[in-house]
Structures are given as structure tokens and as C-alpha cells.
Image (spheres, rainbow, N blue to C red):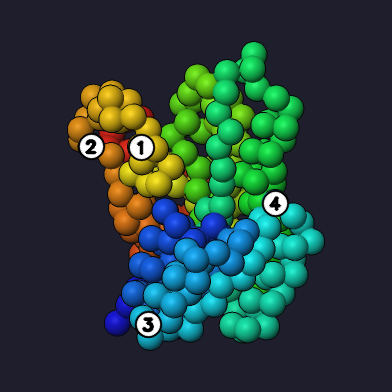
Amino acid sequence: MGLLDGKVAIVTGASRGIGKAIAVLFAQEGANVAFTDLNADENFQKVEKELNTLGVKAKGYVSNAANFENCQQTVDEIVKDFGRVDALINNAGITKDNLLMRMTEDQWDLVMNVNLKSIFNMTKAVQRTMLKQKSGSIVNMSSVVGVGGNAGQSNYSASKAGMIGFTKSIAKELGSRNVRCNAIAPGFIITEMTGQLPQEVVEGWYEKIPLKRGGTPEEVAKTALFFASDLSSYVSGQVLTVCGAMQT
């Protein structure tokens, strides 16, 4: 018996990194998985194939999480294909780091649209289905820099902090219909993105982390599993920091 047997989950930005780890773990726990990404590239196709070997229904959708109408169409398609939505994991995100004095308006707008507007788009798109079901769990992927800030990441930090305010508001708004909303704030997670950093930068990060290592996408995925499953049935409006005690 899996923790998500018979449930349907949507995971955005799931072709790689944390999103992929969540999609795979959810499928292993019995969920039927609909995942989205911007392009049907090689990674996208590999994930779809891998999920389908796990004995669940799984399908990838090319979708731009930053586009309101596109999200609505994608969710309509998913509901038609899967019949319901029990969990939404808003994971799609990008970085365009720069000091404020050098940051362009485009760098600000792009990060806000992909990271913050996307959760408005997707939550609004699944809301009707979840309210009708009188059940659902929405999980927003924030960040420790949304909690504590970080120099050179004012756009990213602002978008991730905005997610936390949105999470707490939606938890209050939808709670009476048994729809929960929580946020995860990962710290330094070893992904393709962080893999491009020089070794000395990575070691500098490890020095600041009491557990003396980076986290794995699978460790973040386990937190998402907790929020999406009935293990957290009385947990809503919370931010769980997954950071090895870096942010306390």
C-alpha cells in the first residue's frame, strides 16, 4: 500500500531536479501523475517513460506555468484525462540572479512571472475541482531565501517570499472545504543548477550548514509526500524549511 494510492497529483516543472524527484516518489507511492514542463525535450520524455514503468497512469503536458490561459487549458485537459486532482505541487521556477544595481526589468519580471504568477495560475485552475471534491492539497515550492533573503537574489527572494504569503492566505480561504495549502522552503539542494557552481563556492555553503552537506532532491520530495498525503491531514498554512538547520 502506497501513501498516495488512487490519488492524482499534478507536478509542475518536473523534467529534472526536485520536480522529477517528486513525480517519481509520488508514482512509487501509488499516485497517478500528471506533470508539466515548458518543452517536450529528452528529459521530459525520459520522465514520462520512467513514471509509466511504475505501474501508475502518468502523462506529461507541455505547458507554460507563467501563462494564465495555458494553465487553465492544461488543468482542464488533466481533469478530463485523470478525472480528479488530489494534489498540486507548484514547483516550476527559475533564477536570474544579479545585484539590484545591475538587475534589469526583464530579469525582475521573468522571475516574478515564472515563480510567483505561476502559483496563482495553477492554484486558480485546480481550485474548482478541489472545492467540488471537498478535498485537496496544494504544495508551493518556496525557498530559504524567501524566508531569510539573499544578496544578489532580490527578485528570486521576493518571488519566494510572495509564495509564502499566498500559501497562508489560500490555506485560510479554502480550509472550510477541506483543501490544504503548505509551502516547502528548501535550502542548498544538489541539482543541475547548483552543480554548475565552483567547488569552493559549494564548500563555502557546506560550512554554513550545520549538517555539513547539501540536501538531495529526494529529501525535498519526501517532504512534498508528507504534505500531499493524509499524514499531514491537519497541517495547513505552514512553511517547512528543508535546509539542514541552515535557516532556523
In the rendered structure, find residue 53 and report the number of the disc placed on it: 3
- Look at the numbered discs 3 and 4 and tell me whether their residues touch, using CB distance below 8 Å: no
Classify 82 as above or below 212: below
Q: In the depicted view, which residue is nearer to us: 186 or 52?
A: 52
Mark 3: amino acid:
Thr
Query: In the displayed image of the protein, which residue is found farthest to the right?
Result: 69
Q: Residue at x 36, y 81 (%)?
A: 54
Q: Residues within 10 Å of mark 3 (few under 14, many from 20)?
A: few
Q: Locate residue 157: give its quadrant.
A: top right
Mark before the other along the chain sequence, 2 or 1 = 1
Q: Residue 6: give x, y in percent of width and height.
A: 45, 83
- Marks 2/4: CA–CA distance: 33 Å
User: Residue beneath label 2, please?
Assistant: 213
For residue 162, above or below residue 33: above
Mark 2 belongs to which amino acid?
Arg
Which residue is labeled 4 in the image?
66
- What distance separates the C-alpha of mark 3 from that of mark 2? 32 Å
Q: Which mark is residue 188?
A: 1
C-alpha distance separating marks 2 and 1:
8 Å
Residue 72, image x, y percentages: 74, 66
Residue at point 37% right, 82% down?
53
Of the two numbered discs 3 and 2 in the rendering, the one whose residue sits closer to the viewer? 3
User: Quarter-wise, where is residue 206 in the image?
Assistant: top left
Q: CA distance from mark 3 to mark 1?
A: 30 Å
Seen in the image, is 63 located left or right of residue 224?
A: right
Looking at the rendered image, the disc whose residue lies closer to the viewer, 3 or 4, is 3
